[in-house]
Image: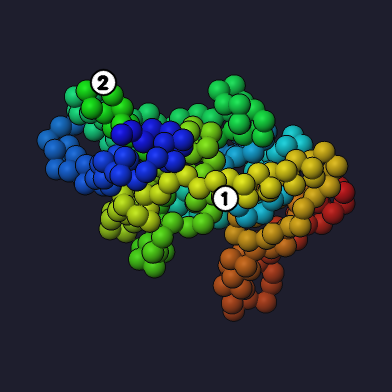
Amino acid sequence: MSLVSIADLSRPISETYRAREEAEKLKDIFIAWHTRSQFSASKFEVYLDSTGGRSNGIHASESSGCMRPTVYSLRGTDKRAPEIVDPNMIMRFTLGKVIHAYIQHAWSCIAAESEGRITYEAEVPIHPGNSEIAKYWSIYSSCDGVIGLWDDDTQFARIGLEIKTQSDGSYTKMSKPDPKHLDQSTVYMKCLDLPLMWACYYNKSNSDVAISGEPYLFTYKEEIWEALEKRWTEQHQHALDGTLPERKTGMECSWCPYAWICDPEIPQFVLNKIKKQQQGKNNESELTRRYFAIRRRNSSNT
């Protein structure tokens, strides 16, 4: 039997076993393609987007962590580029986008060469215009991909693809998907009616890829969705009331487009850079001066 919608998960596992079994072969299919692709030339495009161009609303990637970005977005608050930028983080984000585009390109090639047995759609959009769920909650996002498995003209499996890049240290310590990635994936699964999702973790150091079996191949969980709805209800209420949830500071503050108005405390990684720059110096570092100048200016504007 097929496993193409969330409703299909209510069927006995014996009826959906084949769909799950074939989905577990996705990593093998991905790896095998590389043994063939070396003999043919191809190219792919990389789109270096930014959070500044996002629509106002809820975004799947902000389904965990600090609640303030979504509240600011629901209010239509202006997005501004951070004034203190870590070039290393920008390069890491760019490399991640390149790897995303490469994996998406690979699956497009795999589908094209499969003689109809595999289909693939990249960057599947989610917005109020194509989803009643997205319309209700004001969700704007896109899923990295949706893979379809077919028998002749009959589709028997639909699997979402969520690509995540990791450093070697993070990848080797990992034993299951990060909870925040489960939250993010659940948004895609609910809005696109996907019963299965493969969290395709990619090791940037040695190009290893996470298995396409449990726990990285997982099913839709209603309890995660219910927790997200509770979070979004609170965020919508804050947006309506003109209030803000508790601030949660961290590294993300350094690239948050709302840091200019939220004015978070300086993240620890910036403090570490300041400390390193000030070693052997009696004067304030340029980074320190810029940080406190920004805080003084923000304070005078509120």
Task: State the image coordinates of residue 181 (x, y, percent, origin top left).
Answer: 49, 51
* Residue found 44% across the figure and 56% down from its top: 177
**On the picture, is 38 further left or further right than 103?**
left
Q: What is the three-letter code of the residue carrying label 1?
A: Glu
The circle on residue 223 is 1
Within 10 angstroms of label 1, few (less than 14), some, or many (20 or more) residues?
Answer: few
Vertical order, 88 against 144 (above or below): below
Q: Among all residues in the image, which is located at the extreme bottom?
A: 280
In the image, 141: left or right of 260? left
- Look at the numbered discs 1 and 2 and tell me whether their residues touch, using CB distance below 8 Å: no
Tell which of 73 and 42 is nearer to you. 73
Residue 23 visible in the displayed image: no
Rendered image quadrant of residue 274: bottom right
Q: Residue at x 80, y 50 (%)?
A: 244
Q: Secondary structure at mark 2?
A: loop
Q: Amino acid at mark 2?
A: Asp
Q: Give the residue at mark 2.
A: 153
Determine the residue positioned at 63% across, 50% down.
Answer: 227
Residue 211 versus residue 107 in the image, above or below: below
Q: In percent of the image, x 62 and y 34: which residue is there?
A: 139
Quarter in which the N terminus is drawn: top left
Q: Which mark is residue 185?
A: none
Q: Nearer the viewer, residue 292 or 156?
A: 156
Question: Could you tell me residue 96's position as x and y percent?
Answer: 42, 47
Identify the image's colour scheme: rainbow, by chain, secondary structure or one colour: rainbow
Mark 2 surroundings within 10 Å by alpha-carbon count, few (fewer than 14), some (14 through 19), many (20 or more): few
Q: What separation in Å lies between label 1 and label 2 (alpha carbons)?
A: 34 Å
Residue 88: x %, y % from top left: 49, 56
- Nearest the camera: 13 or 237? 13
